[in-house]
Amino acid sequence: MATDQDPQIRVENLYKVFGTDPHSVMPLVHEGLGKDDLLARTGHALGLKDINLDIQKGEIFVIMGLSGSGKSTLIRHFNRLIDPTEGAIFIDGVDVMSLTQKELEDFRRHKMSMVFQRFGLLPHRTVLENVAFGLAVQNAPKTERNAKAREWLATVGLEGYEDQYPSQLSGGQQQRVGLARALCTDPEILLMDEAFSALDPLIRSGMQDQLIELQDKLHKTIVFITHDLDEALRLGDRIAILKDGALSQVGKPEEILLNPADDYVEAFVRDVNRARVLSVDVVMQPPQCRLTTANIDDALKQMRGWKEDYAYVFHDDEYQGVVTQDALEEVCEKPDRNPPLHEVAKEGPVLQPDMALQDALPATLECEYPVPVVGEDGEYQGTLSKEDMVEVLANSNEETSDKEAPKVA
Amino acid sequence: MADASWLTKFPAMERADLVALRKAMDGGYREFSRTYGDAIESFFDPLLMFLVWFEKLLLGAPWVVVLAVLVGLTYAASRSWKLSGLVLGAFLLIGYFGMWADTMRTLSIITVATLLSIALGIPIGIAMARSDRVQAMVTPVLDIMQTMPAFVYLIPVVMLLGIGKVPGIIAVVIYAIPPVIRLTNLGIRLVDREVLEAATAFGANKAQRLWNVQLPLAMPNIMAGINQTIMMALAMVVIASMIGVKGLGQPVLKSITNQYFTLGLLNGLAIVAIAIMFDRVSQAYAKRSQKHLESVHGD
Ligand SMILES: Nc1ncnc2c1ncn2[C@@H]1O[C@H](COP(=O)(O)OP(=O)(O)OP(=O)(O)O)[C@@H](O)[C@H]1O
Ligand SMILES: [Mg+2]
């Protein structure tokens, strides 16, 4: 039934109210009563409010928000550890609320697995038994599940720890066991609830690298929860920001950075080091000043038309370099006055589209003219000037959000 | 005269009414036990047979064999030579002072009562942990069982089943079962939510969660409950001897009525020795089986 374009996870009008009689207070929630007011008036806690989401196959979808914003509540709806008060969740087009207990258990065994903030390992089982737990629940034969578990342990770099108990491992190692356990059942969807939050910064960054590396091979659908924006920007193909149970914004990392939807999101992104997070292609200007002739006189004419004293030279669609008006005029005055343009062109700095801004910074600041951005095959993608750079890094969201908005891919 | 006396004298119900009430209730219960007593007694027949068989086994086997088994079990459970040596010494002394047979009887009744308490108590504790309603219903019953003087509930048991081993063991179980129930319930409720959630998230069903997560993680608490249950069963042995349970309790009872201090003391010390043995052995076993909890990195 599900086609490739269908989202792997679809959430529709999801509401969750905690309390003794959630349905009785739903009219108030629909009237728009806030979380605090609802709690004061009825003693019910508003966990989630009108969530609509599509999560695509193969993407890393990050859910972000402050403590208590409902991240854990939301992710636990996907495998129905929590039942919604209102609304629907579809996984590959199947309404999870329609599953019987037996079907639900089957679905949890094969379709998705979860990694927990405090690891959630069985303390009385060895590392190997923990990794094999998902398969043991499925009643897979012992030799088979142990073989698979060993494989995954090796993949996460824990070979030789099979017979240890979780308490004998460090936090980072324990979480690797958690990750191996989740991957061991070969699920399509990986739910990770603040999986790296309990780890030291260094270990954490190592785990992020490992996750990215694994994802390049495995192409799972990963729903990743964090309250750390740096982590979100690093891992996320798309990011959703939750506030008090409602979605503030969903978008690609650069959209969130450059166009925060409200003050809440802006407060989140304010302290981000944009130079490190944003890449050149996100902030570059569209291509301009591209000479379409090999003749120097025509070139001069074109440049006068643009009212610029520089231009970029291409040969067979491949970037050759830059020429200035002064240089061309000098060449014109020489007796042998007609060399091909690309021989006159000066090789200057070039940027790659996927470069981080901080790496592009020196070249951009030293260059008199906007630095051309050139793809791997030499194709011209855009330019980045000193002024563009300053504007983006000056952290003035209001200005950038107006100007940069249309260029965000 | 009727105007002020209610202040100085509690307005109790008339004596005659009270007598009538007591008579009615006792009569009703007697009627009940007369009609169903035999049926209930035959219900407990398998228990009696097991009890008798076990007691005969302990009494019939050569004392050397019994002693070897006891010391062997102690070592198997605790892996401690010191403890095993202590048990050996204690039982040699018990035998030397002529209390071997009584000790074997007590040992058998304690063992059976403990097994029965575990077999009943753990499922009840699980049911309590699963449902707040069951917990709300069972907790007051446990409170009553633990605070009611033991002599009081001996009465209906004796009325129903007479005097003998079975009523004795029932009284012991009633007295001793609350800790194992309470601590099973507590232990399961204290199981780390995230670990249980993880099991659920991997598709474990109720039974898999119980056997793979809840019971193993609750085991330290359950073991503590079992330990307390054994201790309480031992304490009950003297009282149960009043309704015909043979063993170390009877000489104690006899020495109270006849003021034989030394006899009482010796038998009392034998009970203490058994208690210490059960306590240390079960604790050492519990500790050994929870080795994985000794964390290296902290938690
Ligand atoms: N079982 C529950 N009963 C009542 N209220 C609950 C329950 N679970 C969650 N809540 C409420 O729902 C809100 C969201 O909680 P949730 O655990 O999803 O937050 P979170 O974003 O995961 O926070 P954290 O970053 O601290 O993990 C909180 O305000 C909390 O009080
Ligand atoms: Mg949370």
Image (spheres, rainbow, N blue to C red):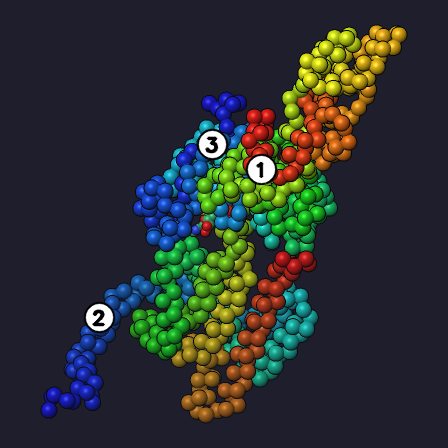
Secondary structure of residue under mark 2: helix
Residue at numbered disc 2: B28
Query: At label 1, which amino acid type do we have?
Result: Asn
What is the spatial separation of the Cα atoms under label 1 and label 3, in whole angstroms? 31 Å
Which residue is found at the position 74% from the left and 8% from the top? A298
Residue at numbered disc 1: A397
What is the spatial separation of the Cα atoms under label 1 and label 2, in whole angstroms? 87 Å
Label 1 vs 3, first from the N-terminus:
3
Q: Are marks 1 and 3 on the same chain?
A: yes
Q: Chain letter of disc 2?
A: B
Nearer the viewer's eye, disc 1 or disc 2?
Answer: 1
Q: Is residue A191 visible?
A: no
Residue at numbered disc 3: A10
| Disc 1 CB within 8 Å of nearest ligand 1 atom | no
What is the spatial separation of the Cα atoms under label 2 and label 3, in whole angstroms? 66 Å
- Identify whether A318 is placed above or below A192: above
Q: Chain letter of disc 1?
A: A
Query: At label 2, which amino acid type do we have?
Result: Gly
